[in-house]
Amino acid sequence: MSSHRPIAITILGATGSIGLNTLDVISRHPDRFRVFALTAHRQIERLAELCLRFQPEYAVVAESADALRLQQQLQAVACTTKVLYGEQALCDVAQSNDTDAVMAAIVGAAGLMPTLAAAQAGKIIYLANKETLVVAGALFMQAVQQHGARLLPVDSEHNAIYQVLPDNYQGNLKQAGIQSLILTASGGPFLHTALKDFASITPEQAVRHPNWSMGQKISVDSATMMNKGLELIEAHWLFHAPADQLEVIIHPQSVIHSMVRYIDGSVLAQLGVADMRIPIAHCLGLPERIVSGASSLDFTQLSGLHFLSADFNRFPCLKLAYDVLHSSNPASSCVLNAANEIAVAAFLHNQIAFTDIASLVDCCLESYSGHAAIHVEELLALDKQVRAAAQKWVNSRMSK
């Protein structure tokens, strides 16, 4: 591999957990990869450090004031990285002729347009942004197919499924002899909390995930299991799997990352320590295996592997995601996502209770059940509408 030109990578969301883990893997293989562009929302100091270390051609931030501040910091240390800002700049670095691959790791619907731009430019896309498929699954998969992009799932669950599917999987479960895909879930920090105590759960408690180190939003999603709900919708698009062939099993140890159930009774699973560098390295290295920096799984240290079925009373957000998958309106997943983003932000700011998250999402799904949206502009308009309605719901709760 070292004799080939290094793969030029753009990292969307470089200062987040996935972005930093990607850079860690890349740093172990300087002959294989080079960083073309790094993007971040507001973490200017951290982005400046990364620019100094990896010397990308471009850095992209959200606002012009932040861009100016970053440019000044970089010039002061003679770093030649050019600084850009705004959504169009994100799309530009994602579809640039000088980038081969894009790590799509921006959290939230903000990641949709640059990831779509990468697909339309036929790039290799390492997909860690859930919302691209949740908000615009049909549209995005069509763009991938139409423009010859290569889509590789980074989420540990989808990557696990990808690793144990037949090599020649063409998107037909029946043809591949597959009965169902099984997504495992840790159950989050409240797996054994009494249901009567759910209303008093605090943001501090909700972001303390038992197994994974993640950002605040995704940690709350894990606690409500909306995270698994979003992953179900993703799996539906990634693997062409209908809702009734998608299972969720709670596995508190997070050792088995997901499984594929075959019609002959075999179940193939992918195991490993809870370290995102494993799925990242798997995607980056294909078709080879490369060193990730993660430690090996020590079976002698495992006290046991346990499994439970997912209880919809405990995790109503998971039920809502299944409802969306069964819905005849493909835009309902866009509604689910937008309402959830507002609900989680409100909960983190102590504006609504933990149990209000599912109530707010349910309310929005009901209100917007008849809203169709196919094109990206329509989906983004719907996303905006739902957010405004959800915010209104939050405000009415606060004023009580």
Image (spheres, rainbow, N blue to C red):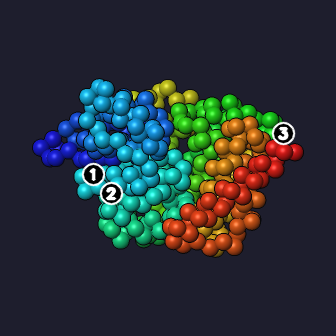
Q: Is residue 279 above or below residue 140?
A: above
Label 2 element class: helix
Residue drawn at (40%, 51%) of the image: 90
Counting every numbered tag in the picture gives 3
* Callout 2 touching callout 3 (CB < 8 Å): no
Query: Residue 258 vs residue 292: left or right?
Result: right
Type of residue at label 1?
Answer: Thr
Foreground pick, 383 / 241 = 383
Which amino acid does the dot numbered 3 rest on?
A: Lys
User: Which residue position is annotated with label 3?
Assistant: 196
> Can residue 357 be spotted in the picture?
yes
Mark 2 and mark 3: Cα distance apart in space: 50 Å
Q: CA gap, disc 1 to disc 2?
A: 7 Å
Q: Nearer the viewer, residue 343 or 381?
A: 381
Q: Earlier in the sequence, mark 2 or mark 3?
A: 2
**Residue 72 falls in image quadrant:** top left
Label 1–label 2 contact, CB within 8 A: yes
At mark 3, the secondary structure is helix
Cα gap from disc 1 to disc 3, whole angstroms: 52 Å
Q: Residue furthest left?
A: 3
Q: Please give the label number shown on residue 95.
A: 2
Instruction: Give the image location of residue 110, x and y in percent.
Output: 51, 52
Q: Which residue is mark 1?
A: 99
Q: From the viewer's perspective, is the residue at label 1 or at label 3 nearer?
A: 1
Residue 384 at x, y percent in the picture: 62, 59
Task: Say which quadrant the N terminus sits in.
Answer: top left
Classify mark 3: residues with Cα within 10 Å, few (<14), some (14-19) or many (20+). few
The disc at residue 317 is none
306 lies above or below 301: below
